[in-house]
Image (spheres, rainbow, N blue to C red):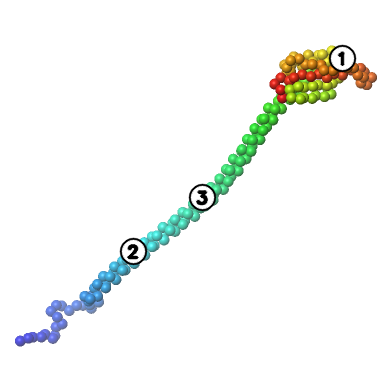
Amino acid sequence: MIRVNLLTGGTGPAPSALGRWFTVPREQRAALVGLTVLLVTALTAAAWWWSMDRERLALDAEIAVAEVSITRLQDAARLVERATARQRELEERLALIERLRATQRAPVELLDTISHALSDGLWLLELRQTGPVVQLEGRAVSLSALTDFVDRLQTSGRFLHTIDIVTTGMETVAESSVVRFAIRGEVRGGL
């Protein structure tokens, strides 16, 4: 005889309402596992995207700071270039001034020698220089004033060899008789 028990639903205890809610039928378990894997993958991708976005924002901030620094350094580099150009210009000017001083030294020394050699009663009208040769023209009240002047020039050491008296002559200036002269000499070291 076969007995069928219609009063009980099965052999085990009856599931509670909460248990029935979480109980997944066998045919849907694979879909639930796939959905869980899909959700975990989506959450992992969202977390990775969020971290990349944060890293991108941090890099953008670093780039902005670096661009500000580059701009500031470019301004400083321009200032350094201007200062360097100005320094080069000033150095060139100083070198030019030194060259001019060196070339002016000889004429100044020559004029100083001539002014110290001048004697009373003698005056110069013209000083001409062609290379190392200097020619002086002037007037003297006596021949002794002229010879004293030539002697002082010769002993100054500024002239090579002897100083030649090129021309002499007498002329009248304001009712006085004076000696007109021209002398020539070669300057030591040239100019």
Q: Secondary structure at mark 2?
A: helix
Q: Secondary structure at mark 3?
A: helix
* Residue located 36% across and 63% down the image: 47
* Residue located 91% across and 19% down the image: 171
Tag 3: residue type?
Ser
Who is closer to the viewer here, 186 or 34? Answer: 186
Q: Secondary structure at mark 1?
A: loop
Location of the C terminus (image quadrant): top right
Q: Hey, which quadrant is residue 7 in on the image?
A: bottom left
* Badge 2 density bin: few <14, some 14–19, many ≥20, Cα 10 Å: few
Tag 2: residue type?
Thr
| Image-based side of 26 in relation to 83, left or right | left
| Image-based side of 81 in relation to 159, left or right | left
On residue 69, the disc is 3
3D distance between C-alphas at marks 3 and 2: 37 Å
On residue 142, the disc is 1
Q: Work out whether mark 1 precedes mark 3 in sequence or the reverse, and give the earlier one.
A: 3
On residue 44, the disc is 2
3D distance between C-alphas at marks 1 and 3: 84 Å
